[in-house]
Image (spheres, rainbow, N blue to C red):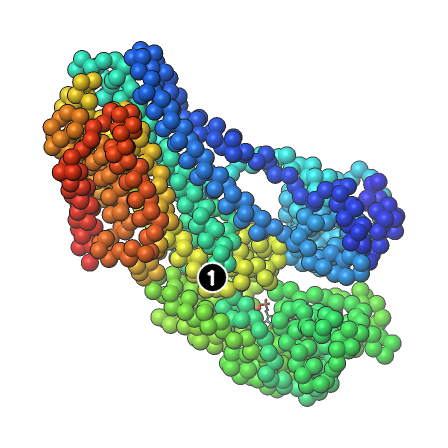
Amino acid sequence: MIWHTSGEQQVLKQLQTTPQGLSAAEVERRRAESGTNELKAGKKKTVFGIFLSQFTDFMIWVLIAAAIVSAFASKELVDSLIIGVVVLLNAVLGTLQESKAEAALEALQKMAAPVCRVRRNGEVLKLPAAELVPGDIVLIEAGDAIPADLRLLESNSIKIEESALTGESVPVDKLVGTLETADCALGDRINMAYMGTGVSYGRGEGVVVETGMNTEMGKIATQLATTKKEITPLQKQLNNISNTLSIGVLCIAAVIFGINLLMGNELLNAFMTAVSLAVAAIPEGMVAVVTIVLAMGMSRMAKRGAIIRRLPAVETLGSTQIICSDKTGTLTQNKMTVVRTETADATLLAQVMLHCNDAVTNDSGQLLGDPTETALLDYLLKENTITLPDIRNRKRAGEIPFDSGRKLSTVAITHNDGLRILTKGAPDVLLARCTLNDNERIAAEKLNEAMAAEALRVLAFGYKDVPETDFATVEKQAESQLTYIGLVGMIDPARPEARDAIAVCHSAGIIPVMITGDHKTTAVAIANDLNILGDGRRAITGVDLDALPDDWDVENIGVYARVAPEHKSRIVAAFQKRGKIVAMTGDGVNDAPALKASDIGVGMGITGTDVSKGASDMVLTDDNFATIVSAVREGRRIFDNIHKTVRFLLSSNAGEVLVILAATLLGWMSADTHFLLPIHLLWINLVTDTFPALALGVEPEEDGIMERKPRDSRLPFFDGATWLRVVMVGAVGAALTLSAYLLGGKGPVGTTMAFMTLSLCQLFAAVGLQSERNSIFKMKLRDHKMLILAFIGSAALQVGVALLKPLRNMFHLTALPWKHWLGVLGLCVVMLLFIEFQKLLARRRED
Ligand code: ATP
């Protein structure tokens, strides 16, 4: 069947459905036949696949090869076995981490799944788009994403943006009717709507003709499935650091190998040492740990109502400097109540309020729809001007829907053999379209101004009667030459939590900006209530903005009133030109460009359209400004934790490299001196790289996290001073390990002490690095459960090797008398004190 060349009735017949929709039983039957309406994403990695990918590292294979050769050469199997076990354990841990990250990302994708409105058995339901089957009747309106391929049955000026499919970004007018040519291009099939495109205007209905992989989008989905995973700027930076360091470590390992050979050490032993060091010190796990920390951060944000759609947003949030927010619903409660009406003709006013209104009632008499419009009906019902049946029995002869650019909405009803046109909208726009004399106009404007100053959202009402009966013939002039009826004012109280969140913004160096379609006076009244203005920051209107040059004083404007969605893009551009990181909220179709252009596009989970959500980096489940601020807070915490984790990992690796380098130069690495064995290095890598690093990744936020300025995203991840601190901690760890060997008398006792010291020092360092600047004496133990757990667990693994006889023998260690244990402990405390000293210096420098 070719859908676009068939008539509506023919299509319905073919699909065995009616405009009332399918029955539940029929839906079940069809689902069994056609499957769910989903595009099959690229092949999911299996756990086993993830496990195998742990072995893609070249150095691991060199190590395994060396272990096998050494087993044959020395006829000593134990060492090689231990190497095998440690490599395997490492891979298992890596697999666990990675699958956890994958699972978290997948769960989030599910949360962002699109919904649609379907008519089944005559009843309109909201359902996940995945549940659609062919024959379902779908209702669409401006802002919706098209959930499946539809043949349109009704179109009220529908325009659809089909760039995802056709590349054409100008919305296409859609009509109902039968096309002539069967093989016309997708973009010319104007009676069809395709999955993955978005409605930019109008409303209508369509019948589902294809679902899932059978849709036009499904046919090109193989291309989509192979799109690469996005990698965040931070991950990119860390990849670079990791690559550079890997090369550095390999070079040092080669030098160590050379020196050991020159000193007459056995070839195989020298080689094993070099390779083990390389495997242990190359920070290959660093990027993986960072991904997990980001993914876990994402789930935490989701629990607090901020769903991240793109991973890079997690870290960008941390450096947000500007939050531009819509007023209605985000800064205010979006609970409108009519508190004032000003009119000379209450009956006419009530007629417009009732008919020029898209809100509806359900069976239990509840009002559903846009809060501005439900408020009008609610008022009429409470005043007993209308009853519920009046709402249900409304009939319209034509309409021009509201859009935030025009700021008007119009409905026509039949009246005395002609039409009555009923219009409501923003007073400044509507008054200009009314036939008022100068005195009347000035009076109305004054009244509007006075109501707006009381923080009221004001709507103006007008009407006119025309003799024509077909709305299409008068549509073009419908909103002009109107008779003015009056004004209605409603309150929409500020969200109390928004006030607190704005105070946090001020202390955190984040500039809050209010953007609204509402009147300037109303906007300023609410902005003052929320404390957004002040510090000489001003309010301007969209018209004022049009008159300003591109380099206007954007940082001194706190409120933009009466803006059209296009203005948002201009505001974003102005901030970005000054190098600022901007978050921007949006809910309408026309907000999509600004959402895409901003650094963090923030969509609205409740009131947002699919199109705006699709363009966002983050979606708020509660539409609440305070949620943006708590996401920023979380973003800062995550960045801090990644910083700590990487600092810890690199400090540990530096320690390992430096100690082996020094021992080599001292001539301690020969087979008979036994300073540290290859298996020791690998074991330390296993014990310290994983648990403490992950624990640092979930550390609680630092004190005063929202009292410092946003991080400058242009700065490198590590500055010179941080690199120096990393090397210093590594050097101290190395020195302490060498001392331990000396204290133990350079024999097996020395080796055991050195092994314990190198590893345990790293664990103590993790505890010290838990804060970038605060002393551990300020650390509240109960806030750091994971770190303590990691510390105890890792320490138990490490000490266990020395305490349990079979393990001790395997690792070529000897039992330590308690005095020597005390010595090890003392050396570890020195490490902790050193880090505390570094923090003390850092605090001094900041103050
Ligand atoms: P924000 O941009 O903060 O969400 P807003 O909700 O006031 O603010 P819009 O929804 O674009 O922005 O509304 C702009 C103006 O249009 C309002 O101030 C009001 O005067 C008018 N308006 C809003 N809703 C309607 C409607 N349903 N019908 C007619 N006019 C409306």
Q: Residue at x 17, y 47 (%)?
A: 833
Ligand 1 within 8 Å of disc 1? The answer is: no
Work out which quarter of the rendered image holds the N terminus and state it: top right
Give 431 or 361, whichever is nearer the viewer: 361
Q: Residue furthest bottom?
A: 344
Q: Residue furthest front?
A: 805
Viewer can see residue 33:
yes
Give 470 or 796, whichever is nearer the viewer: 796
Residue 291: give x, y in percent of width and height: 43, 42
Seen in the image, is 399 located left or right of residue 846?
right
For mark 1, give the secondary structure. Answer: helix
Picture quarter with ligand 1:
bottom right
Q: Which residue is mark 1?
A: 627
Q: Residue at x 76, y 48 (%)?
A: 28
**Other residues around mark 1 within 10 Å, as few (<14) / some (14–19) / many (≥20):** many
Disc 1 residue type (three-letter): Thr
Seen in the image, is 524 located left or right of residue 214?
left
Q: Residue at x 29, y 29 (%)?
A: 807
Residue 42: give x, y in percent of width and height: 59, 36
Above/below status of 600 relative to 210: below
Residue 720: give x, y in percent of width and height: 24, 42
Q: Quadrant of residue 663?
A: top left
Q: Residue at x 71, y 85 (%)?
A: 384
Residue 19: give x, y in percent of width and height: 82, 56
Above/below status of 638 relative to 352: above
Seen in the image, is 725 located left or right of residue 345?
left
Above/below status of 699 relative to 452: above
Above/below status of 73 relative to 825: above
- Numbered-mark total: 1
Work out which quarter of the rendered image holds the C terminus and state it: bottom left
Viewer can see residue 846:
no
Give 418 or 3, whichever is nearer the viewer: 3
